[in-house]
Image: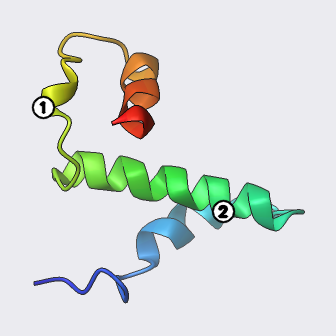
Amino acid sequence: MNNLIEQDPRGIKARTGPMLGFKHFKTASITHAGIELIRRIYNGQFNVENLRIEGTAMPATWNAVPEA
């Protein structure tokens, strides 16, 4: 239903708006990827069920997701 290419950018703008900006493109891309990953996990678009991370802290979840 949603076009993944042209999604609403308000979520990114709301989180990066208070920042002073990014000095390097690498920093901006890492931040953008992290925000998008959290959004996908929250919306259930990224399957974390088979990672066996129930009851673990958020840093453990964060580290397990890129390895999946």
Amino acid type, callout 2: Ser
Crowding near pointer 2: few (<14 within 10 Å), some, many (20+)?
few
Q: Is residue 23 left or right of residue 63?
A: right
Question: In the rendered image, which quarter is residue 7 located in?
Answer: bottom left
Answer whether residue 19 is visible to the viewer in this image.
no
Please tell me how crowded label 1 is: few (under 14), some (14-19), or many (20+) other residues with Cα within 10 Å: few
Circle count: 2
Q: Which residue is mark 2?
A: 29
Tell whether 31 sits left or right of 5. right
Query: Which residue extends farthest right?
Result: 23
The percent coordinates of residue 8 (x first, y second) are 36, 82
The residue sitting at 30% across, 80% down in the picture is 4
Q: In this view of the protein, which residue sits in the foreground, 60 or 67?
A: 67
- Relative to 58, does residue 25 appear above or below in the rendering? below
- The spot of residue 62 in percent (x, y) is 43, 30
Q: Quadrant of the C terminus?
A: top left
Quadrant the N terminus occupies: bottom left
Residue at left 64%, top 67%? 17
Q: Which residue is found at the position 66% from the left and 62% from the top?
A: 29
Closer-to-camera residue (42/33)? 33
From the top left corner, tell me how far across and down residue 36 is, in percent.
43, 59
Type of colouring: rainbow
Disc number for residue 49: 1
Distance from label 1 to label 2 (Cα)?
27 Å
User: As shown in the figure, which amino acid type bears the numbered disc 1?
Assistant: Glu
Residue 23's place in the image compared with 62, above or below, is below
Image disc number at residue 64: none
Q: Secondary structure at mark 1?
A: helix
* Residue for point 38% across, 26% down: 64
Judging depth in this view, the residue of 6 and 8 nearest the camera is 6
Q: Secondary structure at mark 2?
A: helix
